[in-house]
Amino acid sequence: MAQTAVTPASVAIPRVNPFLPAFTLWWREVVRFYRQPARVVGVIASPLLFWVVIGAGFGSSVQSGTTGTGNFLHYFFPGALVMIVLFTSIFTMMSVIEDRNEGFLLSVMVAPVHRWGIVLGKVLGGTTLSAIQGLLFLILAPLIGIRLGLEQFLMVVLITFLTAFALTALGFAIAWRMDSAQAFHAIINLFLIPLWLLSGALFPVSGARGWLKLIMRINPLTYGMDALLQTIFPQGPVTLLPVWSSIAVLSGFAAVAFFSGLLIAERRSTLPAA
Amino acid sequence: MATLLQDPVSTVPGGGSAAIHVEDLRHNYGKRSALNGISFDVAGGEIFALLGPNGSGKTTLFRILSTLMMPTGGRAVVAGFDAARQPVEVRRRIGVVFQARSLDLKLTAVENLWHQGHLYGLHGAPLQSRVREMLDRVGLAERAKDRVETFSGGMQRRVELAKGLMHNPGVLLLDEPTTGLDPGARHDVWQYLQQLSTEERVSILVTTHLMDEAERCDRLAILHEGRIVALGTPAGLRAEIGGDVVVFESDQPEALASLIKHGFGVPASIIGDKVRLKSSDGHQLASTIVESVRDRIQIQSVSVSKPTLEDVFIDRTGHRFWAEKPAEEAK
């Protein structure tokens, strides 16, 4: 009875289907990205540059037996793909900090939306962007003589998507409590770049020894890299696990990252939300 | 569990039908306390202002009411639900307009509202017509398809308002809604708020540090150091002081104040470097004082006025509204 006096205008307040906010946040993330041409150019051009420079530079000095062709540009191709995915994923999640500082996030947080709708929308938005960037890079594969069958291609799409999702979720979990882009950069340099360096992207796990090998084996990204290498170079020696086992580990990584993000975002406290 | 959470807290003593019921609300940030036991009610269809200088606890209170933060003590019931324990139920019924810009500049006005509607479960044709309706109401129908980054500050504020009202909330919370707006745009915003309150019976709580904005509200609470120092209608609060307020500007405020105290038996206080007193006949008293002290003390200016909300604030706190911190340190 008290309610009618308080909310006279609202005849019926609809229950919010959590997929609707998730969809709208996903949509916004994607639209926003493509309306900033500088971001699009940067994200495509910089990994390309990395790949060509690092690949060509190393190529003449290091010989790799993994691909069977001995060309480092070859070996480095999946590594560069993961790097593109890593960069795009992480940088899209910088928007969490931006949104918080601007006030956009506040308006989302006072909406009657379950937190997992918010996390899912944000993470899927970032995932979409980085997976698309990664797959765009794949167009270059034939240029260096990498040819993929349909089944291989679909596998690569799946692995790329899972890797993108895991890394975006990780970026989200890290960014959620942060208030400055500088701090986020520090974490990227300290934590995420090594994660990529030690994933088998630059050199194979089989080439590492001792503690380095141990770290690489613990690194969940290694398994994404591993699955990708095996899919793209089926004739290369088996590295760590069979493809599907690697994909399973990668999926586990994605799930853990997503639920950490959710747990962090769900916490309500007596501290300011922004 | 879900049904249990949906039960409104209707058994609040004295707060059953209030749009907002705040009861002995306390909040600490670590050791620093920001709210020291605040209680007030906002009735349905009322415009209620929280007036206070920076650091008075306004923002903390706003965060708690808008469910962004849980209080460390006491409780806040908004639209019938406890803001700390039933945040989702509260969120469904409130519209919030933040001081910071919450629009996405890269999206158009329509897209911003469309996005907002989705967050509240609106979709499809009803959402589209609602977006059009709201843009029409804030007078931006012609700019609907333009990116918000091309809008002026006043236009962006109007979109913010439209955004907060998309889901037709019964309670609207606004944090310093006219920050950075020119007088014309401020006037528009207030006119719209008044229209909402009278025509649609929307209950509105607005925080402000501007006296003239607080004057436009039905009732207000003046916050100072986490406490409510005055609560009532603007006219009522001014009437409590009564009579006139006389302010002298002088090089020797201390000497002047003590002369007034001893010579006229009127308590005079020094606020900043001005001497201030209250009187039932300010004009008479002012000229008498000026006459009698003119040989001893130089008086630069005298002003006699009806009490304002600022006088209410000074009366209750002994501080000037602005720069009350330096005044404190000077003691």
Image (tube, coloured by chain):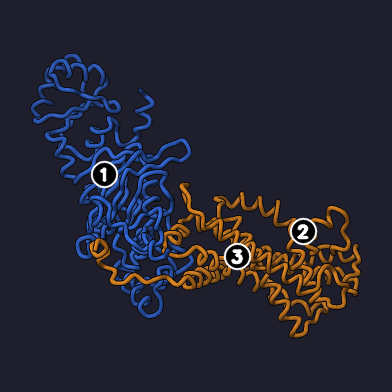
Chain colours: A orange, B blue
Mark 3, residue position: A38
* Nearest the eye: B103 or B175: B175
SS at mark 1 in the image: strand
Mark 3 / mark 2, whichever is N-terminal: 3
Q: Are marks 3 and 1 on the same chain?
A: no
Q: Residues within 10 Å of mark 3 (few under 14, many from 20)?
A: few
Cβ–Cβ under 8 Å for marks 2 and 1: no
Label 2 crowd bin: few (<14), some (14–19), many (20+), radius 10 Å: few
Mark 1, residue position: B221
Q: To which chain does the residue with label 2 belong?
A: A
Q: Position of residue B183 (x, y in %)?
A: 28, 53
The total number of labels drawn is 3
- Residue at horizontal 39%, vertical 71%? A15
Q: For the residue marked with disc 2, what is the amino acid?
A: Ile
- Relative depth, front residue between A235 and B321: A235
Q: Nearer the viewer, mark 2 or mark 1?
A: 2
Q: Position of residue B92 (x, y in %)?
A: 37, 64
Horizontal relation, residue A134 to residue B66: left or right: right
Q: Residue at x 45, y 65 (%)?
A: A113
Residue type at mark 1 is: Ala
Within the image, what quadrant is residue B52 found in? top left
Between circles 3 and 1, the one closer to the viewer is 1
